[in-house]
Each structure stands twice: as C-alpha cells, then as structure tokens.
Amino acid sequence: MLSVGTPADIRADVVIAADGTEAQFARRAGLDTTVPLREMMSCAQYLMTDIDIDAGSTDFYLGNDVAPEGYLWIFPKGERTANVGIGISGRKSRDGTRAKDYLDRFVAKNFPDGKTIECIAGGVPVCRPLPCTVGDGLMVIGDAARVVDPLTGGGIGNAMFTGRLAAQVASECISAGNCSKEALIPYDAGWRASRMGVLLERNYRVKEYFVTLDDRRLNTLAESIANISLKEFSVSALIKELIKRNPKMLLELKALKDALS
C-alpha cells in the first residue's frame, strides 16, 4: 500500500475489512462482493434550509413517479432545516431518471425557495449479505459485508454490531495463535444467528414483496393504515396491521405474512 505517497508493507494477523460499499479489500482477497444492479440503490441527499417542514415529523414518499423501487425522505434537523434525500434502484437509473433528477424535481415542486447547502451521493447495497464474511486472516463487516437493512437502507447500527463482534472474535483468535478461516467462523455464525441476522433476512423478503407493487396497490396499503396509532412502531407491527386491514388482499399479502414466520 501507499502511505503518504511512499510504498509500505503492512502485515497483520487479522484484517477487519470495513471499506464500505465498494468492498475492495474483500474482493481483492478473493471474496465475491458483486451486488446485482437492481439491488444497488443509487442515492442522493441535500442538506436544505429555509424550507417549510414539520420539524417533529419524519416524512417518506413512495411511488414509481417519485422514487422507483425506493423511497424519498425528509429528515428534519431543526426548524426549517432537513436532510432531503432519495434512493432508487440502480436498474432504474438512466439519463434524466437518475436519483438526483428525481430529487431535483421533488425539491423544485415542494421547496422552490429552499437553499441547498450540502450535497452527497453514493450507492447503498440492499441485497442479501455475503455468503461468507470471513477468510484466512480476514473478517468483513458493515456495508462491505452487505449487512445494510434491505428494507430501510440503514446500516450504521449493523456496522457497529458486526464491528464489535469481529473485534471480539479476532482478539480471541490472535491470543490463541490461530486466525484461519475456520477459527474466525464464529464471527460469521454469530451475527447470522443474532437478532440482526434474523431481521436482515426477514426485511429482505419484505423488500422483495414491496418492489413488485404498482402505485395503485401501494396507495391502497398506505391509505389503509393512514390513521393507525402504534404504541411501538416496528416493521413487524406494521405488516400485521396491513394484513389485518386488507382482508381482500389476504392472498396477495401472503408473502408478507410468510416473512414474519
């Protein structure tokens, strides 16, 4: 590697690869980190100010005209200031229909007088995790391991969880003098068996159902739960309400019901 422009040879018993979506280290170590185009979300976000928002409400917008196979969000950061962003499926991104194009149209319509003071863009993988997240002397965590929540696109909490678990297992293996793939496998098995691992698989199946819906069916489901009041909001509670309030769609909603089992 290069360190301040100078070639350097750095060696370690274990490398914990935390290099994000690109996952270059794991790929160079021989792991297949390919993300299907449809499951790589193309994302853009503006930090905006001087906009009329409800500072106490986090807003989400769904629909193929707004954010195909994804969603648009408004995350308040105070009075008249918010992160306004979008994520769309990579396979929907074309000239004129990029994430930024959809976001610009939304902003022009809803916040014509707002000021954009920061812009960030990037890709978020919403596929299943890597088939294996360890190798000889190698552990892969966070976005590089593809442990982003496939339904929400959130990854900070999962990255912290896998990072801590990887550090614990790595410490034990270094002390034992064995950092082989077999010795490191408790890390891979551990996060898969955890609540995080179970929810990743459930939310992947829920995501796969929702991306099949057209705007008419999305609206039907959204309107059916417009006035619900959940004591504790969760994906599980939301799905149960959708099933309960849409008996005519019971057969169609079977995929959601199965995702809970």
Image (cartoon, rainbow, N blue to C red):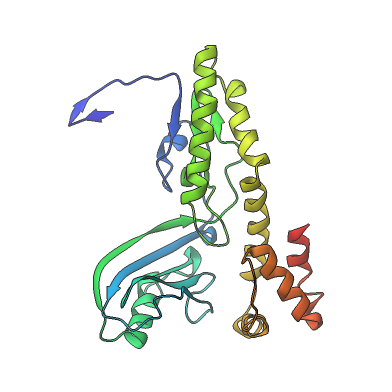
At x 35%, y 71%, the residue is 100
Left or right side of 204 for 106? left
How many marks the image carries: the answer is 0
In percent of width and height, residue 95 lies at: 37, 73
Quarter occupied by residue 135? top right
At x 68%, y 40%, the residue is 193
Question: Going by the picture, which residue comes out furthest to the left?
Answer: 5
In percent of width and height, residue 41 lies at: 47, 61
The quadrant the C terminus occupies is bottom right
At x 37%, y 66%, the residue is 44
In percent of width and height, residue 229 lies at: 64, 77
Is residue 179 visible in the rendered image? The answer is no
Relative to 210, say whether 197 is above or below.
above
The quadrant the N terminus occupies is top left
In percent of width and height, residue 48 lies at: 29, 73
Quarter occupied by residue 112? bottom left
Q: Nearer the viewer, residue 59 or 203?
A: 59
Left or right side of 245 for 91? left
Is residue 188 visible in the rendered image? The answer is yes
At x 62%, y 52%, the residue is 200
Question: Going by the picture, which residue comes out furthest to the top?
Answer: 177
Q: Nearer the viewer, residue 38 or 225?
A: 225
Relative to 224, say whether 8 is above or below.
above
